[in-house]
Image (cartoon, rainbow, N blue to C red):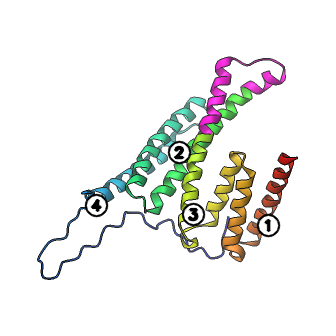
Amino acid sequence: MTVQKSRWSRGICNFVVLALLATLIGCGTTPSRYNSDGIDAVEVAQRITKNREQAARIIREVMDTVDTEKFESIQVSIKRYEEAEVLLNEAVSLSSDSLQPRLERCEIRKRIADGYQYIYAILDQECTPLEEAGLKPDDDLLRRRTQARADANRWLRLSLRDLEFHLRNTTAAYQHPNQYWELQQIYVALGNYSGARAALMQMMEVYGTKLSQRDRRAAESRIRLYSQKMIDADG
């Protein structure tokens, strides 16, 4: 997706905003570095930064080492991504008002979902020919396929929740059309064409003429497609 004038920057809010320190006039006291819960704000900021850096390092390592032709390599990569998600989950909990940790968690959750979808596709390729021939695949194979689909959907919903939270709680200045496009793709992966259609309609409403003609045509085409799928489902 492209936008003619983007006001959104991924560099916004990389760190938790520390409380302003002010000298109390006439008191001669030193402002506290602790918040109302007795938590050291500096330590919190350092922990958030450390977690985000560790998560980014894991992502780079996976991208450098994963072999998409090997089933076992995909499984290992998913587990590594899940380790990164735990780090980002803590970062989000420590900085609920900061945008970037949540967006990074959204992305890693989508990567995990993609991994499980890949595993599902591999297992489905083994099951489908047997099923079409009227044969029953091995019970363990069927179980693993079902579990892979369930895991993929679980992580898709978690990613969806992060993205919806971001779009619901920020203004257009902190958003980008790509985020709405990603939202509709997640909805489609979950089989929710109503949600996908609504996401694109919201994107059109928010950005309107700021979208390129190509992007507007693509969105309008998909809106019609999803509307037809909803009609077909009802019929």
Question: Which of disc 4 and disc 2 is earlier in sequence?
Answer: 4
SS for callout 3? helix
Whole-percent x, y for residue 175 in the image? 57, 67
Q: Distance of mark 3 from mark 2, alpha carbons?
A: 31 Å
Q: Which residues are magenta?
A: 127-152
> Can you tell which quarter of the image residue 208 is in?
bottom right
Question: Which of disc 3 and disc 4 is earlier in sequence?
Answer: 4
Query: Which residue is found at the position 25% from the left and 58% from the top?
Result: 40
Q: Is residue 223 magenta?
A: no
Q: Quadrant of the N terminus?
A: bottom right
Are the residues at dot 3 and dot 1 in contact (C-beta closer than 8 Å)?
no
SS for callout 2? helix
Q: Distance of mark 1 from mark 4, alpha carbons?
A: 47 Å
SS for callout 1? helix
Q: Distance of mark 2 from mark 1, alpha carbons?
A: 33 Å
In the image, residue 97 above or below residue 121: below
Whole-percent x, y for residue 99 in the image? 47, 62
Q: Distance of mark 2 from mark 4, alpha carbons?
A: 33 Å
> Can you tell which quarter of the image residue 98 is in?
bottom left
Question: Which of disc 2 and disc 3 is earlier in sequence?
Answer: 2
Few, some or many residues within 10 Å of mark 1 (<14, 14–19, 20+): few
Query: Which residue is found at the position 53% from the left and 65% from the top?
Result: 169
Are the residues at dot 4 and dot 3 in contact (C-beta closer than 8 Å)?
no
Q: Which residue occupies the foreground of this view, 67 or 232? A: 232
SS for callout 4? helix
Disc 3 residue type? Arg
